Image (tube, helix red, strand yellow):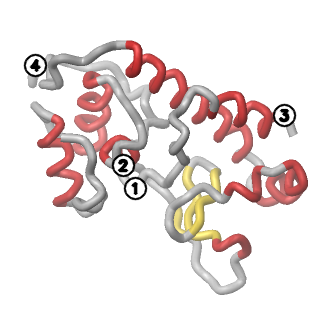
Amino acid sequence: MASADTQGRAEAGLPGNFTLTLDRTRHFSEVHGDHIEHNLGFIQDGIPFDRAGRLIKPLFEKRNAKELEAKFPAAAEAIARKLKRLADEHRAAAEAPIEETNNQLGEQQPHEEDPDADVSLEAWAHGELKLLPHVVYRVAKRRFGKFFRTYAEVVAHMVAARMVDPNRVKVL
């Protein structure tokens, strides 16, 4: 399966502890029933996640390629695209030293359409994904409809909306 090979190459640019998880700040589908295989709990962008919101990795192994293609036809392509995008974002954030994390955009300044559908603010808040500050603020403004001045404001909003567990937050 070509997408599994792509997935392996894309993961090489990410931190060793990185795992793809459900982004609860974006739309997702919840799956109900006792007949669900692989502990399937959610689907987001055509990608299956277990009931804890983690990627169901066994489906992406070569031996399960037919099952993945039959049940989730868009998953392999979507995960390859996501992993490439996340690897590129992580590499850019790691190469650019950040001294100032306050939002440099003005409150009334227009911003471009959200190109960041694959950015997980939940993973960012848990310290699993590094992002440039302007990406964090742009995504937060688009998703929450609110202007944020600091990382702490973004995280506080996510904690108040119960999108992230305050005990797991590693970004402030």
| Amino acid marked by disc 2 | Glu
| Amino acid marked by disc 1 | Arg
Considering only order in the chain, which callout, 1 or 3, is on the residue closer to the N terminus? 3
Q: Residue at x 46, y 24 (%)?
A: 89
Instruction: Report which residue position mark 2 lands on.
Output: 122
**Residue at mark 2 to residue at mark 4: CA–CA distance:** 24 Å
Q: Quadrant of the N terminus?
A: top right
| Amino acid marked by disc 3 | Ala
Q: Which mark is residue 106?
A: 4
Q: In the rendering, at what x and y percent does residue 171 appear?
A: 24, 41
**Residue at mark 1 to residue at mark 4: CA–CA distance:** 27 Å
Considering only order in the chain, which callout, 1 or 2, is on the residue closer to the N terminus? 1
Using the image, determine if residue 38 lies above or below residue 12. Answer: below
For label 2, the SS is helix
Instruction: Report which residue position mark 3 lands on.
Output: 2
**Residue at mark 3 to residue at mark 1: CA–CA distance:** 28 Å
Considering only order in the chain, which callout, 3 or 2, is on the residue closer to the N terminus? 3
Q: Nearer the viewer, mark 2 or mark 1?
A: 2
Q: Nearer the viewer, mark 4 or mark 3?
A: 3
Q: Quadrant of the C terminus?
A: top left
**Residue at mark 2 to residue at mark 3: CA–CA distance:** 29 Å
Tell me, yes or no, whether the two marked residues, 2 and 1, touch with CB atoms within 8 Å.
Answer: yes
